[in-house]
Amino acid sequence: MAREPREGRGRERNREREGGDDLMDKLVSINRVAKVVKGGRRFAFAALVVVGDQKGRVGYGAGKAREVPEAIRKATERAKRTMIRVPMREGRTLHHDVEGRFGAGAVVLRSAPAGTGIIAGGPLRAVFETLGLGDVVAKSLGSRNPHNMVKATFAALQRCTNPRSVAQRRGKKVSDLLGRREAPAAQEAADA
């Protein structure tokens, strides 16, 4: 029985791989668990993976197995099945600030001007990079458990809306919600 070559020892935290379907996956965390049996210890691995197309779709999944590559494969398959679409402004940031909670974890996601970059730590950064957000500021509050942080981030992202859907729901025009773009320039010209 031939074994597959192992990729490191499971220590690498940000593993990237491009799939044939243009999906990027990032390994957020890997956890080794030991079960004590008569002959000694049996080790198992739990992996948390985030998958995205960098165009507004992202998903996460967890997998457990006796070997690291198998745990990562299971987590990646689950992540592909749970993908969600997130509306983005100009393809680089969120439309509005949003908060998300899961268990004891809470996150605050804020839209940012162009050139800000991704200001977020660990698991949140992995979600934003696979999602394709270029400018966002995020703060994690409460639990620092990677699973809770990722789930709280997804809870926040699911609450994101775009102006078109809000305007349609309220029976208004998008320009009524956002205001005129040239209004500040016209106001300054009138004041001068």
Image (tube, rainbow, N blue to C red):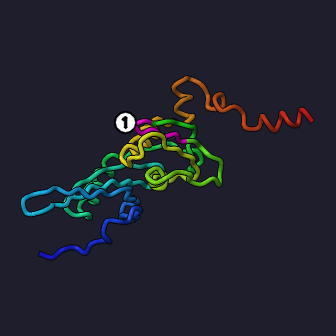
The image quadrant that residue 115 belongs to is: bottom right
Say above or below: 18 vs 51: below
Q: Position of residue 58 (x, y in %)?
A: 41, 49
Residue in view at x 77 percent, y 34 percent: 183
Quadrant where the N terminus sits is bottom left
Q: Which residues are magenta?
A: 101-109
In magenta stretch: residue 108: yes
Asked where in the image residue 65 lies, by quadrant, the reply is bottom left
| Residue farthest along the top direction in this orientation | 171
Within 10 Å of the Cα at label 1, are there few (<14), some (14-19), or many (20+) other Cα atoms?
A: few
Residue located 41% across and 42% down the image: 143
**Residue 152 on image: x %, y %:** 42, 40
Task: Decide which of 182, 106 is in the foreground and name it.
Answer: 106
> What kind of element bears circle 1?
loop
Q: Which residue is mark 1?
A: 103
The question of residue 122 being in magenta is answered with no
